[in-house]
Image (cartoon, rainbow, N blue to C red):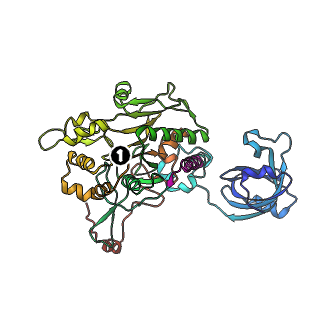
Amino acid sequence: MRKLNLSQVSQYLDKEVELFGWIDVRRDHGKLIFLDLRDRSGKVQLVVAPSDKETHAIASGLRPEWVIKITGIVASRPEGMVNLKEGMSGKIEVKVSKIEVLSEAKTPPFALDSDGREIDEEIRLKYRYLDLRRARLQKNLILRSEFLKHIRDFLYNKDFLEIETPMLTKSTPEGSRDFVVPSRLHSGKFYALPQSPQQYKQLLMVAGFERYFQIARAMRDEDTRADRGLEHTQIDLEMSFVEQKDVMSLVEEMVIFASEKIGQKIMQKPFPIFTYDEAMEKFKADKFDLRADKDSKELAFAWVVDFPVFSAEGGSASGGEKALTYSHNPFTAPKADHVENLLLGKNLELLTSLQYDLVCNGHEVGGGGIRINKPEVLEKVFEILGHSKEEIREKFGHMLDAFEYGAPPHGGIALGLDRLIMMFQGEEALREVVAFPLTGDGRDPMMDSPSTLTKKQLEELHIKVEEK
């Protein structure tokens, strides 16, 4: 007898089944005992009659959240007891003949039958394995998994290869602060955790793989907020021999396909396109909400293009002038007719890039661009940003070398999975769509991290910790 999900039980009317799950509710109605058995797929009502004294005695002792195995016959519910709100499972019940207690449970520290928003974040995350039992969070993570399945299906059908890139990499100045990892084998040296797979995916294009994707983990040591954490998951892809319109078209098709597969309603297709200047003039921001009714459950996607290559918000240079920083990332190519001015160092604040952002309901949910594929252009960008030739060679020599061996024109995007699921589900914080998130100040109360290392561990890493 194979294990059934509880959502499948209604297909076995008048048959004996074996079920596993958690006790959700126990109700004593005179001599009859009713139990709601729960697993991730739903709930099923169990009925224990007093005629089987041994089974009835076990049922009398069951408590919520105990884990049990039962054997019984699937039957139609009596007239008047059908609950259509429960779907097909509301039309049947299981008459229990045998109960086996697999695991008893203490009383949870908080209620699991509410949506959980009223519970303090600290205690929710300390007992996250219990918090995740609530229906809202189970629904969020199941939908997240389903969305990723459709993303993968779409990309495999478009001839993409799923390729993993390293988690231990080199610290390079890409915008945010790196998380660093000390090397035990190479004293005094450090790895960095990836802020994104940016350089690796471009190197995969140089390697000739042409169409890459990855459901990538990315870490950035920056201040947290409701829609940004220390780590996140992104749908990362890159394509060779493409122009801006090719990547935008494929990504739009992918987002529509996967979103509608999970029942989302998209307000406008094709997605409207705004230039950066148009967005700033009309919305005063480069991420905006096109919905007239901000409480509606529609998804209002839009593209933003024609970003400046450089921004003058990077502080002051030694001469008192504002120093330039890159608008998005230093690997994004300028428009073809702006390359000459870039190489000459002329009119730098007027240069326009081949960057494109995807926004939805007031959030940026994706950013990408056509990449620089010529070493002299990339080197010039870093020079303009204030790096010496020695620094450029030390930090990015591997990219410059690679581009000298035949780099195809290429471009891609990274979509923020956590933010997308947050919007799909109408949630206001990333922790509601992530299995094991950190608190707002970057801690994990469940695992008690970050934590100190032992003296032996520190000695192996050749690290001394100074007390503040």
Residue at the limit of the structure toward the front, as seen here: 406
In the rendered image, which quarter contains the C terminus? bottom left
> Of residues 415 and 284, which is closer to you in this image?
415
Image side of residue 384 versus residue 248, left or right: left
In this view, 132 is above or below 98: above
Part of the protein shown in magenta? 141-161
**What is the x, y in percent for residue 205?**
40, 53
> Of residues 143 and 212, which is closer to you in this image?
212
In this view, 245 is above or below 180: above
Residue at the limit of the structure toward the left, as seen here: 319
> Of residues 368 and 217, which is closer to you in this image?
368
Q: Is residue 26 visible?
A: no
**What is the x, y in percent for residue 138?**
60, 49
Q: Secondary structure at mark 1?
A: loop
- The residue beneath circle 1 is 371
Image side of residue 118 versus residue 200, left or right: right
Residue at 48%, 38% (x, y): give it: 249
Residue at 25%, 43% (x, y): give it: 325
Image side of residue 402 versus residue 360, left or right: left
